[in-house]
C-alpha cells in the first residue's frame, strides 16, 4: 500500500477503551475507533479523553483508524 492511499483526519478523543483503543469524533461528525500507532506506543505518548488528535485511515474501512499525532 502506498502512502497516497491513506487519508488523514483530525478529531477529538471521546473515551479511552481497553487495549489502547479510543473512540474519536472527527471534525466531520463521524465516530471512529482508533488505536495508537507504533511510534506513539514506543515513546509512551499519553492520550486522554478531550485531546485533539490526527487519525490515519485507509479507504477500506471507514470505522477504524490509527492515531498518528496528538496536538
Image: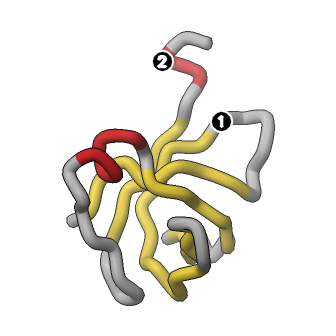
Which is more toward the observer, 32 or 38? Answer: 38
SS under mark 2: helix
Q: Residue at x 48, y 18 (%)?
A: 3
Label 2: which residue? 3
Q: Residue at x 55, y 72 (%)?
A: 22
SS under mark 1: loop
Does 46 sit above or below residue 56?
A: below
Please state the horizontal and vertical placement of residue 57, each as a whole percent of the image.
59, 43
Does 7 sit above or below residue 67?
A: above
Find out whether the residues at labels 2 and 1 contact each other: C-beta distance under 8 Å: no
User: Quadrant where the N terminus lies?
Assistant: top right
Does 3 sit above or below residue 32?
A: above
Please state the horizontal and vertical placement of residue 39, each as a whole percent of the image.
30, 41
Does 34 sit above or below residue 50?
A: above
Label 1: which residue? 58
Q: Residue at x 46, y 79 (%)?
A: 13
The colour scheme of the drawn protein is secondary structure
Which is more toward the observer, 44 or 68? Answer: 44
- Circle nearer the N terminus (2, 1): 2
- Is 55 on the left-hand or right-hand side of 46? right
Q: Which mark is residue 23?
A: none
Which is more toward the observer, 29 or 13? Answer: 13
- Is 53 on the left-hand or right-hand side of 34? left
User: Quadrant where the C terminus lies?
Assistant: bottom left
Amino acid at each position: 500500500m502506498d502512502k497516497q492511499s491513506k487519508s488523514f483526519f483530525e478529531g477529538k478523543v471521546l473515551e479511552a477503551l481497553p487495549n489502547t483503543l479510543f473512540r474519536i469524533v472527527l471534525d466531520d461528525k463521524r465516530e471512529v475507533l482508533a488505536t495508537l500507532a507504533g511510534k506513539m506506543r514506543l515513546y509512551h505518548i499519553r492520550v486522554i479523553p478531550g485531546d485533539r488528535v490526527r487519525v490515519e485511515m485507509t479507504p477500506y474501512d471507514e470505522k477504524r483508524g490509527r492515531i498518528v499525532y496528538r496536538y
